[in-house]
Amino acid sequence: MSELTVGIIALFINIGLWLGMYFIQRWESRTGRISARRMHNKKDLKNTFLYLYDFFTNGFVGDWLALSMVDMAVAVSIYQNGFQSWMFLPVLVVAGSLVHFYKMCTKSNHKTDWGFPRVGKISWGGRSHMVYAGIQGWLICIGIIFVAIGQMNLFPLFIAGLAIWVICWLADFLTGRFSSI
């Protein structure tokens, strides 16, 4: 298998996982498990129920573009260097981050959204997002370690993807989409 094939497979896996979250969100909306879709109101973020694609981080630029770039670079690096035992260590960091994220999103001051539609409640979309975030967090950690040990051969692709995602996160934060942070 070529490195290009590995990168393309990583791209399609990322997009497939994102589409899974999208269709779960759509099912929950249609069955009344989460609030019905309303147009995003930029002037009243406090009272707008945000869906997956209303966030810069979760939308097409953050998850589709940026994390596809990261995933492609990390997958090719794993393919080139082989899977190594140290790659299990980031799971601990990611697990801790996910526990923190869950606690933050289930607090009473968290603005409800597609993943946490009621105070203290996680939706199926939220659960799928936790799995997605865990996979992506793990890959990002591996990518950072590859950079640190000089084994990231697609360094520009990885750094560009990571930079785009961080810009998306800052945009979500600065526009009030992350109300409880």
Image: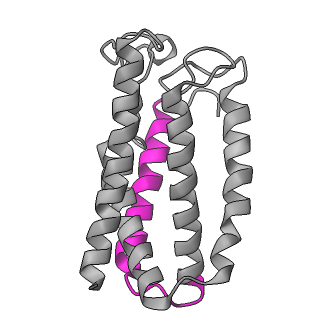
Q: Is residue 72 visible?
A: yes
Q: Is residue 133 magenta?
A: no
Q: Main secondary structure of the magenta part?
A: helix
114 or 83: nearer the eye?
Answer: 83
- Estimate the x, y position of residue 29 in percent, counting from the top left: 38, 16
Q: Name the residue located 71 percent from the left edge and 71 percent from the top edge.
A: 89
Quadrant location of the N terminus?
bottom left
Give the residues drawn in magenta, as a range: 147-176
Q: Name the residue located 57 percent from the left edge and 42 percent from the top edge.
A: 130
- Estimate the x, y position of residue 167 in percent, counting from the top left: 43, 52
- Compared across the picture, whether 36 is left or right of 45 comes to left
- Estimate the x, y position of residue 127 in percent, counting from the top left: 56, 35
Q: Taking 58 as reference, is 75 above or below it? A: below
The quarter of the picture where residue 7 lies is bottom left
181 or 144: nearer the eye?
Answer: 144
So how many labels did they put on this image? 0
The quarter of the picture where residue 22 lies is top left
Quadrant location of the C terminus?
top right
Q: Name the residue located 54 percent from the left edge and 32 percent from the top edge.
A: 126
